Image (spheres, rainbow, N blue to C red):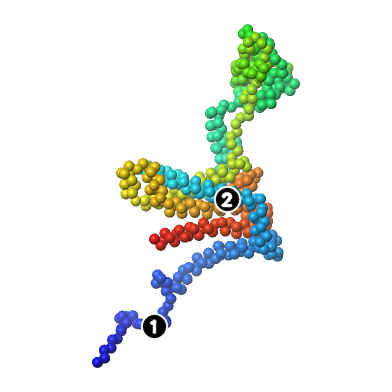
Amino acid sequence: MTTSTTLKAPTGSPPTPVGSRRPRWTTGTRFWVVAVFLLPALVLLGALVLYPIGWSVLRSLFGADGFTRFVGLDNYTEVLTDPQTVTALQNNAIWVVVAPVTATGLGLIFAVLTERIRWATAIKLVIFMPMAISMLASGIIFRLVYDQDPAKGVANAVAVSVHDTFAGASAYPGAHPRTGGSLAATGDGGFTTIAALPPGTPAALPLLGVAPAALSGARQAAAPADCPTGNLCGTVWLDFLPGGGGRPGSIDPGKKALAGVRVQAVRAGRVIATATSARDGTFALPTGGTAVQLRLPATNFTPQYQGVNWLGPTLVTWSIIGSYIWMWTGFAMVLIAAGLAQVPRELLEAARVDGAKEWQVFRRITVPLLAPVLLVVLVTLVINVLKVFDLVYVIAPGATQQNANVLALQLYLSSFGGGNDQGVGSALGVLLLALVLPAMFFNIRRFRKERAR
């Protein structure tokens, strides 16, 4: 007896031959549907990314005059041996090491510190606000911040204020005696009398070159009225009358006293007494009854402290990095704060119950749990700083632009900013791409690992 079994297709679903099945993606969507939706993105990707990369690689193999002269790898040789490119590579290395680490570290500190305070949202908004400003605008802002003039630059205004708090400014910067007078330069910025003066002799110390602003409220200069026995007395005054007139070396009516000038009595190269001129310019020095020379130390005439040359050859790169950190710390803080919100509070509270200090909780629990987020932020900022251009171009003055040079700026200068050599510029672009690719691949690999978990 034979038993036969017949397989029937489900009601309403006619059987489909195996060879006629249409290809589908793992999500069940047909291939042509996926292609239609991806086509606009693929066209844009090819036009805006793949085509420029291919064109730059091809253009880097030809000379400055276009595609008429094939030079092979000569442009790359020129790039790697050019002193300007070497400087740009060195500065890019400083950027990669300093800027991402500092911005990420500050972002971590702000994210942790603002987690428990009442006005956390407002404070985070203030810290993140620089991200709303373009690189160009930030460059203009910090060009003014770093201005050498303390009346304009905020950084130097602070530096001058702090300096003058601990080291007072000189009384009359730039003042000097009349040529051929009784005072001679000492070589350190000060002045001393040519001959020794005996006690009881009026000492005349006339000066020139005093700014009018330093004479505000100055009195009429006067000769010493009464000099104690054994002392050497004299007057310090401005030996100049507006509009001319008067006799050189004479205390004429209208000549102003120089108050606050330090005067030293010197015998055998050693200072034996010091005095400060009064409001009428007079002073008295005990000399022990012997002749002495008078010295006006350099501290009376040193120029006013003008602050730090932030945009000079030494500090220009570090100053621009400071402006970048000001902008991107808020970005790092927001991402780290989002990761911090996912940290299990039970672990933190358990550590505190077990007696861990806040620093131990931060170092042994918070930071290890935030390591993936910190790494993503760090790598993202590394990619960003390798392409920095706007800040360097705007902030660095022309005199020190080469000292702050980076690869993106050198690419612009070689291609369009006077070099007019797009072959070398394209080689620089390919070199910059080669430096960015490892960080990009690392980030993509991290994302794939996170997705696979």
Quadrant in the rendering for residue 140? top right
User: Whole-percent x and y of residue 241?
Assistant: 69, 20
Q: Which mark is residue 286?
A: none
Q: Which residue is disc 2 drawn over?
A: 92
Whether residue 114 appears in this view of the structure is no
User: Whole-percent x and y of residue 41?
Assistant: 50, 65
Quadrant in the rendering for residue 187? top right
Secondary-structure class at tag 1? loop
- Amino acid at circle 2: Asn
Q: Residue at x 48, y 60 (%)?
A: 444
Which of the two labelled residues, at mark 2 and mark 1, occupies the earlier sequence position?
1
Q: Nearer the viewer, residue 103 or 52?
A: 103
Q: Residue at x 64, y 55 (%)?
A: 80
Whether residue 51 appears in this view of the structure is yes
Q: Residue furthest left?
A: 1
Q: Which residue is disc 1 drawn over?
A: 17
Judge whether 203 appears above or below 150 on screen.
above
Secondary-structure class at tag 2? helix
Q: Residue at x 48, y 68 (%)?
A: 38
